[in-house]
Amino acid sequence: MSKRIFLVVQMLIAVAVLASTVPAQNSRAASSVSYRQRGDQWMGQGNSERAIEDYNLALVFDPNNADAYNNRGAARYDRGDYAGAVADYSLALRINPRSADALYNRGLARKAVGDLDGAIADFDQALALKPKLIGAFNNRGVARGAKRDFDGALADFNQAIKLNPHLAEAFNNRGNVRLAMRDFAEAIADYNRAIKLNPNYAAAYVNRGLARKNRDDFAGALADYNRAIVLNPDFLEAYLQRGLLNLSRGREAESRRDFDQCMNLNPDAKRLIDERVRKVEQK
């Protein structure tokens, strides 16, 4: 659950094209709210670029509009500007230091730029303010797992699952930690649960395929990679893993086709392919 928390106050849902102007207001604060609301509408329509323009205007009229900073951070996050998102969430928190939502959002952005310690600190603070913030447990678990704090990660995923037993992402993430711990049977059990909850969860199929491959269940792994590709024909990791599996089984023509498809999806994938192939050849 990596979804940002989007702060909306009296948001008007746009049904058609948004108006090009904002009605004149009696105060700068009211004008700021109007621009922020229109920015929220643009975000609702998936237009983060126009949303940022309106959040900029909202902040011209009221530089202390914490919601505008938070929501501009969300728009920047959506555009892949994670550093910009961190900066905006930090500004929102300077105005409202006890905003659990802004702390959670900044944690997501910090995790995205690789600042795992900063992300964990933000999730810690968010949970101190909102002890049942499921996304903070789930994402702190991901950050802890990336730091190889497997016990801490498992504790976080267990808590996320306790709060929401239907959260497929938490089961998939817990499976990833168990896979890293080489507890393949338990990893597969977690992936099975994730897939049961979300039969279209392509990433869980790829991850289960990895666990099955490590147990020498090559047919099961191949079936999982195939299913992931059916669900998401542009899933580069699924083609890569299937190609590596075929290569390890001596099926060079099939592996070459999969690697070619990786290159079609992303020409920069060659370095990654070469690195993974070397590891297979060294075994």
Image: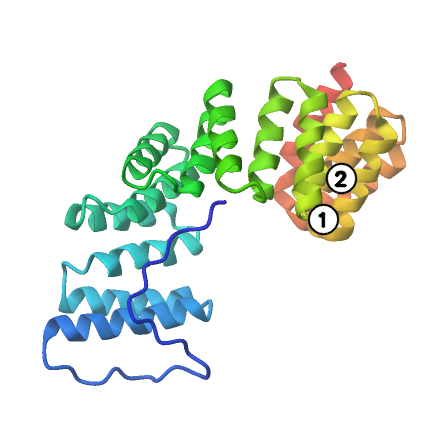
Figure quadrant of residue 186: top right
Name the amino acid, label 2. Phe
Q: Which label belongs to residue 111?
A: none
Query: In front: 266, or 80?
Result: 80
Disc 1, SS: loop
Q: Residue at x 57, y 40 (%)?
A: 165
- Residue 222 relative to residue 9: left or right: right
Q: Residue at x 18, y 60 (%)?
A: 65
Name the amino acid, label 1. Pro
Mark closer to the chain start, 1 or 2: 1
Query: In front: 174, or 44?
Result: 174
For label 1, the residue is 199
Can residue 236 be spotted in the picture?
no
Q: Is residue 177 above or below residue 73?
A: above
Query: In front: 46, or 251?
Result: 46
Q: Residue at x 65, y 40 (%)?
A: 194
Proximity of marks 1 and 2: CB atoms separated by less than 8 Å: no
